[in-house]
Image: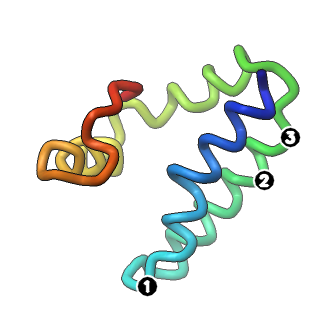
Amino acid sequence: MIEQARNFILKEVDNPALNHPDLNQKIKNKVQNSKNIVNKMKKTGDLYKYLERFHNTPIIKLYNRALLEGSSIKNRTYL
């Protein structure tokens, strides 16, 4: 189960951010650090607690706005 959760985060969050041409290197470094932390998680509960820290950050608000504006993942309700 933890492997599926990690793969989902990598596919839907980390890799798109790291590959985005307009994202500055400082942010990409933070994403890479988060990716490293996520890959070390052994339990889904620990992963959930780690991801909760991002719940009310500006990037999540921006992400939610992108969902509302028609992102390809707009029908997902995991945020």
Dot 3, how many residues are within 10 Å of its Cα: few (below 14), some (14-19), or many (20+)?
Answer: few
Q: CA distance from mark 2 to mark 3?
A: 7 Å
Dot 2, how many residues are within 10 Å of its Cα: few (below 14), some (14-19), or many (20+)?
Answer: few
N-terminal-most mark, 3 or 1: 1
Query: Which residue is at the far top?
Result: 45
Closer to the camera, 47 or 6? 6
- Residue at 30 percent across and 52 percent down: it is 72
N-terminal-most mark, 1 or 2: 1
- Residue at 45 percent across and 76 percent down: it is 20
Query: Which residue is at the far bottom?
Result: 21
Closer to the camera, 8 or 30? 8
Task: Say the numbered circle drawn on residue 36.
Answer: 2
Image coordinates of residue 18 in percent, x first then y, are 57, 71
- The residue that label 1 is drawn on is 21
Q: Is residue 13 left or right of residue 76?
A: right
Q: In the picture shown, does residue 15 fall above or below 2?
A: below
| Element type where label 2 sits in the image | helix
Q: In the picture shown, does residue 41 fall above or below 69?
A: above
- Residue at 34 percent across and 50 percent down: it is 59
Q: In the picture shown, does residue 71 fall above or below 50?
A: below
Image coordinates of residue 6 in percent, x first then y, are 71, 39
- The residue that label 3 is drawn on is 40
Dot 1, how many residues are within 10 Å of its Cα: few (below 14), some (14-19), or many (20+)?
Answer: few
Q: Report the quarter where the C terminus lies.
A: top left
| Element type where label 1 sits in the image | loop
